[in-house]
Amino acid sequence: MPELPEVETVARQLDPLLAGRVIERLQVFDHRLDPGRPRGIRGRRVGRVFRAGKQVVIETAATGSVDRGPWLVCHLRMTGRLLWQEGRPRRPEHGRARLCVWQGAVDFVDPRRFGTLRWCRSEEEFAPPGLEPLDPGLSARRLGSSIAGSRQPIKIWLMRQDRLTGIGNIYASEILHEAGISPSRPAAGLDAAELRRLHRSVRTVLRRAIRHCGTTFSDFQGAQGVTGSYQQRLGVYGREGARCRRCRGGVIERVVQQQRSTFFCPECQR
DNA sequence: CTTTCAGCCTGGGCGC
DNA sequence: TGCGCCCAGGCTGAAA
């Protein structure tokens, strides 16, 4: 699945397409999804589309009123996509659900069927438990106090959604490479200077990836099949055996942590 | 409490 | 071509 930059990209692409459109209905083709059925959706409009953690949130609103909600919350997990179609929609392969709006539709496509879709009646229901990495108020100190006490390797810690929301397997490796920190270091063992580098890398890597519309693999495309370009800028992910772009001396290695691949440069990550 | 690990699904790529 | 195996961007819940 898409991680934070890919989810942000999808939300940014969908927002101008959907905002203000009258909602007609939500069709569910895969009944394992079971999003719930709030009353009175018909005739409401889409307010805005935004990201909450790794979720795409489609806010509904009453016409000409400050009355907001419910919210349609989609978690794309590994292979989910949201495809916008103007006019008369075609049913895409692996289409699991479709939100029909005025003169268009958004299809939730998910070959692997890990993704989820649910109606939430309050914003608290979809609020992620962890810190938001791009929150302007997130300081290195606050990041450090959240890390304090964890004996997990820092790479595993970075992917903990209950602590920091939005980082997955690709960006965890990328962030640690940028910060020059080895993925196997115990999280609580980082010193103050390393924490500052980690804090800065979390934000710069995610922002840079958003600027390039995320990383596109075969499973992920933006709202209109738009492909991100960040994969050309990846420092370590998927580059096993290649020369390190940071120190130009090391050769990228792959190790397995918690059954997931981690990529790093043994020369410049300590 | 913290941490690990199988399981959920399907499809693509690879070696034989 | 076909088959079996391994791999994949995430998360949950049970077990240690």
Image (tube, coloured by chain):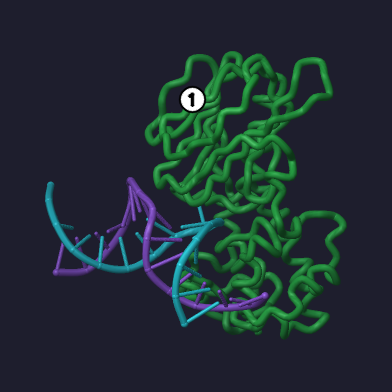
Chain colours: A green, B purple, C cyan
Q: Position of residue A57 (x, y in %)?
A: 66, 38
Q: Is residue A131 left or right of residue B8?
A: right
Q: Residue at x 74, y 82 (%)?
A: A190
Quarter of the image containing the C terminus of chain A?
bottom right
A137 or A13: nearer the viewer: A137
Whether residue A217 can be seen here: yes
Percent position (x, y) of residue A114? 46, 48
Observer-nearest residue: A138 or A73? A73
Q: Which residue is mark 1?
A: A27
Rendered view: A213 above or below A241: above
Q: Is A72 drawn above or below residue A152 in the view shown?
A: above
Question: Residue A123 or C14: which is nearer the viewer?
Answer: C14
Q: Would you call the spot at circle 1 few (<14 residues within 10 Å), some (14-19), or many (20 or more)? A: few
Q: Say if A225 sits above or below A39 in the image.
A: below
Residue A254 showing in the rendered view: no
The residue shown at (70%, 26%) is A60
Q: Position of residue A249 (x, y in %)?
A: 58, 81
Q: Residue at x 65, y 72 (%)?
A: A176
Q: What residue lies at 59% left-to-right and 72% top-to-bottom?
A: A156
Q: What amino acid does circle 1 point to?
A: Gln
Left or right: A252 with respect to A59? left
User: x and y percent of residue A122 in the render?
Assistant: 73, 38
In the image, residue A64 above or below residue C9 = above
Left or right, A143 with respect to A32, comes to right
Secondary structure beneath disc 1? strand
Chain under numbered label 1: A
Q: Quadrant of residue A82?
A: top right
The image quadrant of residue B15 is bottom left
